[in-house]
Image (spheres, rainbow, N blue to C red):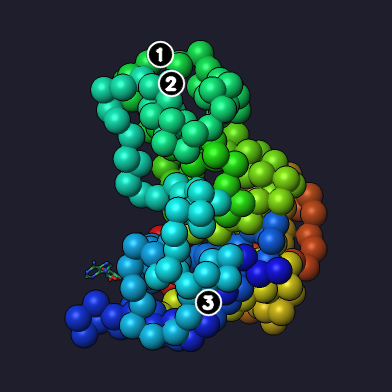
Amino acid sequence: MSVINISNLYKSFGDKEVLKGIDFKVDEGEILGVLGPSGAGKTTLIEIMIGHLESDKGISKIFDVSSTQLKDDSYSKIGTVLDEAGLFDRLTCRQNLEIFRKIYSIDKDEVNTVLQKVGLYESSNVAVDKLSKGMKQRLVLGRAIMHKPKLLFLDEPTSGLDPSTSQLIHKLLLELKQKGTTILLVTHNMQEATDLCDKVAFLFDGKIIEYDTPTRICDKHNELNQISIVTNHDKEFKVPNNKESYSEILNALKDDEIKSIHSSEPNLGEVFISLTGKELI
Ligand SMILES: Nc1ncnc2c1ncn2[C@@H]1O[C@H](COP(=O)(O)OP(=O)(O)OP(=O)(O)O)[C@@H](O)[C@H]1O
């Protein structure tokens, strides 16, 4: 069953057309990555899906219910990690989770379970305004998953975080997926999308310009036909597999020796650049 169904969705702000006919669906237990540059409309899309914004045209359905008709029973199945953390700064980690626990009538033990899960148990009694950015983000994620949502919306959950915090969040997301949670993940990070997502959608200029599994997207655009070279000093570079590249390779190898040389499919980031001429920043 599809948990999210989006069809022919349009949204403008004034005369600025942000979404120009978006279609996709996300099946139960799938992670869909939505990738696009700043201003592409990713947050707008999430806001429409969760019923915070109305589209101008088209269909957005969550659990087969129109996003404009979502009620408490639907929201109790949804978790969100959006830009606005909405944490209470002066309250501790535990107190923040307690408030949420009471709103959702969640079992008391869940607060400890979640604090442990997101690695904040030792900081249970630390006020939010004393937490690092990564700790706050983990707390927001903990709050979003405490009621065991069936669907999770994440808007750049690891943006600006150190690699170990990002890894912890990735691990948690994969555990949730294994338990059947459906996840829509907005990210700028192509590696994150490759590692976590069953499918990715490239959002560009108001449209989805590519939508498939990361592997199939990279295979499909293998016309980039590159060679990857790794030198003995572990310097890796990629060049087009054509005659013009040979002098470049020889120059680069003057001071070093080749450790490996092989043909290389493009990664998601390279496909994105080849399709749009833009990097994902
Ligand atoms: N409430 C609003 N009123 C007017 N314009 C808006 C509003 N919300 C978003 N926009 C505009 O819509 C476009 C898409 O914004 P959105 O925040 O959805 O992009 P995004 O892809 O999430 O960007 P980022 O990666 O920077 O968060 C931007 O040009 C933004 O300025």
Mark 1, residues whose alpha carbon is within 10 Å: few (<14), some, or many (≥20)?
few
What's the distance in space between the residues labelled 2 and 1, CA to CA? 6 Å
Of the numbered discs in the image, which one, if any, rests on residue 6? 3
Give the amino acid at mark 1: Asn
In the image, 42: left or right of 249?
Answer: left
Disc 3 to disc 2: CB gap under 8 Å? no
Secondary structure at badge 2 equals helix
Instruction: Name which of mark 3 and mark 2 comes first in the sequence.
Output: 3
Q: Quadrant of the C terminus?
A: bottom left
Name the residue beneath numbered marker 2: 94
Give the amino acid at mark 3: Ile
Q: Position of residue 216 (x, y in %)?
A: 73, 73
Quarter-of-image position of residue 5: bottom right
Instruction: Name which of mark 3 and mark 1 comes first in the sequence.
Output: 3
Q: Quadrant of the N terminus?
A: bottom right
Give the amino acid at mark 2: Arg
Q: Is mark 1 within 8 Å of ligand 1?
A: no
Q: Nearer the viewer, residue 180 or 161?
A: 180
Of the numbered discs in the image, which one, if any, rests on residue 125? 1
Secondary structure at badge 1 equals loop
Query: Vertical placement of 112 versus 262: above or below?
Result: above
Query: Vertical placement of 30 versus 275: above or below?
Result: above
Q: Is mark 2 within 8 Å of ligand 1?
A: no
Whether residue 220 is visible: yes
In the image, 197: left or right of 38?
Answer: right
Q: Position of residue 160 (x, y in %)?
A: 42, 42
Residue depicted at x 78% and y 60%: 261
Residue depicted at x 37% and y 16%: 126
